[in-house]
Amino acid sequence: MPRDTTDPRAGHHTPDSPDPATAGPAVLPAPPPERPGPPDPSGPAAPRGYRAVFAVREFRAVFAAHLLSLLGVVVSELALTVLVYDLTSSPLLSALTFALGMLPYLVGGTLLGGVADRFPARRVLVTCDLVCAVCVAVMVLPGTPVAGLLLLRCLVAAVSPVFTGTRMAALTDILGEGELFVLGRSLLRIVSQGSLLAGFGVGGVLLTVLTPRGAITITVGTFLCSAALLRLGTRDRPARAREGGGGLLGESLSGARLVLGHRRLRALLLLFWLPPLFVVAPEAVAAPYADEIGVGPAALGLLMCAMPVGHIASELYAGTALRPRTRERIVLPLAAAGLLPLAAYALTPGVAVAAVALVVTGASSAYVIGLDQWFVAEVPEELRGRAMTLLTAGLMTIQGVGMALTGLAAEFFPVHLVVAGAAVLGTLCLLALVAEVRRTAPGPGTEVRDGEDRQVPHG
């Protein structure tokens, strides 16, 4: 499952929305007039599939910036963890450094989401990269105390959902809202999975020849290069917000209420969030499981890599071999059944069988390609930045919660039963959620904007 679901941001004014706990369906703001999208190349010689996405110059800049920024985050996380342990000799503080990479996502995504719609996307993206570069540069200073290192880590994590949400929303300007957007999102997810593996490898190599602070220094350059690519390689588009908006905090919370208070959007968000809550279980207890079945570090590495490999392979296949309509048809079946292979852990399988189960489960994440299209079609344009930021914040937070709950359960039950139990419980929850998604699906010629089906004219 993806750790980072790449998103864009911008800003806007929203009308007061009713509290979903006390009122009827949320009323989403009417979308503003359409903004011109990217040219849609056609003709027999036009590139198709992922090649068509890379043919868009602005996307190439976004892609390169994403790769550099992500590598910077992964390497700095690893180096900072080692640095904190070197300074304190405390396993708890070292582990806390990793945990702080997820927990502030909820705060940043909820309280700062209005930034994504209030300001021009390019300005937000560049500013976020510069803030991360400054934070990492301060980490490098020898006099920075451990508490300061952890605080700076929290700040980088709080900025991350705003950056990711803004980028995801900006892709709809760069690539449009159709096939190119879906494939562009897919490419960024694929590079996220690959960079997680490569980043830890690169970080490990760097730490053999550099001090932790030396490795962190290199990541300052990756953030600065990302900022330069976004500044010079993308157009300066206006903010999505209408003039006359309220305070930033109010806009952020209003956007979250509008999205979560809308039945269809809430169901789609949960379909993004719920599978990762359970699918992180085998990763969270991979080391204890390897110890339980008596295998060494090499086997542990195989178990950790299996799920990302399945995800990358399935997403590439879905993006290149399946038609858009087929991708939408597989969303609900894959989401409902994707966790079932992990039930094989109930039999305490060896490395080979466990790795196959993990690869198959990773492959089920291809459902997100079709889900992306449903989500972006449902969210009004001027709310899109905040919706994407909330999506990202929730995804990262739910994975952290899933890891914590898995670890807690493993304190009381055998590891293999914890993973199998997560598969069964997760499947039951997803079956109920899939039923809700089906109930809220708009019929032919309708759209769900205010909790009720409304006819839309056929073009």
Image: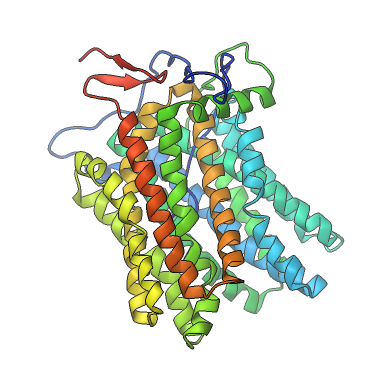
Instruction: Report whether residue 33 is seen.
Output: yes
Residue at figure coordinates x 58%, y 16% from the top left: 13
Residue 201, position as x, y percentages in the image:
52, 72
Residue at figure coordinates x 15%, y 33% from the top left: 43
Residue farthest to the left, as pictured? 44
From what the image shows, is residue 121 above or below residue 315?
above
Residue at figure coordinates x 70%, y 61% from the top left: 97
Instruction: Report whether residue 54 is seen.
Output: no
**Which color mode does the image show?**
rainbow
Residue 84, position as x, y percentages in the image:
76, 67
Q: Is residue 296 shown left or right of residue 223?
A: left
Q: Is residue 51 shown left or right of residue 142?
A: left
Residue 365, position as x, y percentages in the image:
36, 54
From what the image shows, is residue 201 above or below residue 163?
below
Residue 74, position as x, y percentages in the image:
58, 60
Q: Is residue 38 shown left or right of residue 242?
A: left
Circle count: 0
From what the image shows, is residue 309 above or below residue 288?
above
Q: Find residue 311 and report its image quarter.
A: bottom left
Is 425 in front, or is 287? 425
